[in-house]
Image (cartoon, grey):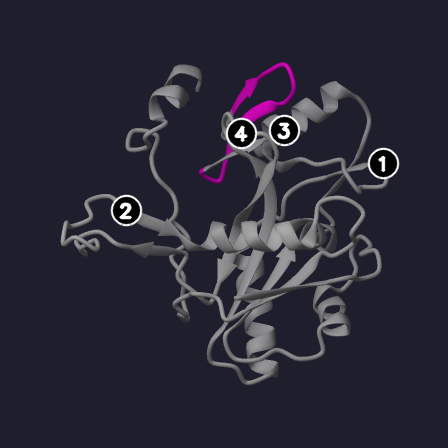
Amino acid sequence: MKINAIKTSVFRPRQDLLAFINKYIPDFFEKDILVVTSKIVALGEGRLVKKTDKRAKLRIIRQESEAVLRTKHVCLTIKDGMALANAGVDESNADGQIILLPQDSFRAAAEIRQYFKNKYRLKKFGVIITDSRCLPLRAGITGIALGYAGFKGLKDYRRKKDIFGRPFKFSRVDVADSLATAAVLIMGEGREQQPLAVIKDAPAHYISQVDRGELKISIQDDIYGPLFRKFF
């Protein structure tokens, strides 16, 4: 698998995202997966709020969340079935404003995919909208797929056998977030100015219609559920 991050100019609010991608990636090929950081998707949608004070930011976080727990450093939140800090509300590289997450990352991924799939007459082509997140009890950030299109986000090993013939009971691989993490590592989180990437030869199963709920798991079934139930 190869990942090529694309350096670009600064993306501006309400700028045409498809034209921007076209400018920096002139061609796509079969089995390519385009990675787009959620920040430029949100900017294209105009998902900006003028920064005022901490109370206003907290109010925005609450509006964007299904559950909120205030902590010393951030608000731990659940948004769209995902555990995120501050509901993804971000001030980094925002020129003094607050950037929210895209309105619907799965829909955005599907629309981007449809455009380039048609333009280049591709059968197998994927798109991932990425963000970054922290993992419990681990320093640093990793990537997350807020939305994706064109491939299965989950690989199921259940009822298959391991190398010693023992059937898997629970094992499933989160393909979408794994690819997002690999891409975010290459794209960078600072001044790299690389909001786009192309993944080639990814170990993905390409499909036309994704199940946007396939990666979600209820708090009752989650192995970390007792922690969530205690605080949310």
Q: Look at the numbered disc 1 and give the secondary structure of its residue.
A: loop
Residue underneath mark 3: 61
Q: Does 206 appear in magenta? A: no
Marks 1 and 4 sit apart, C-alpha to C-alpha, by: 29 Å
**Amino acid carrying mark 4 in the image:** Arg
**Dot placed on the residue nearer the N-terminal end, 4 or 3:** 3
Residue underneath mark 4: 138
Query: What residue sits 66% from the left and 80% below the top?
Result: 27
Q: CB of mark 4 within 8 Å of CB of mark 2?
A: no
The picture places residue 99, in percent across and down from the top left corner, at: 72, 41
Residue underneath mark 2: 171
**Disc nearest the viewer among 4 and 3:** 4
**Amino acid carrying mark 2 in the image:** Ser
Q: Which mark is residue 96?
A: 1
Segment colored magenta: 68-81
**Amino acid carrying mark 3 in the image:** Ile
Marks 3 and 1 sit apart, C-alpha to C-alpha, by: 17 Å
Question: Relative to 148, is 117 above or below?
Answer: below
Image quadrant in which the C terminus is located? top left
Marks 2 and 3 sit apart, C-alpha to C-alpha, by: 34 Å
Q: Look at the numbered disc 2 and give the secondary structure of its residue.
A: loop
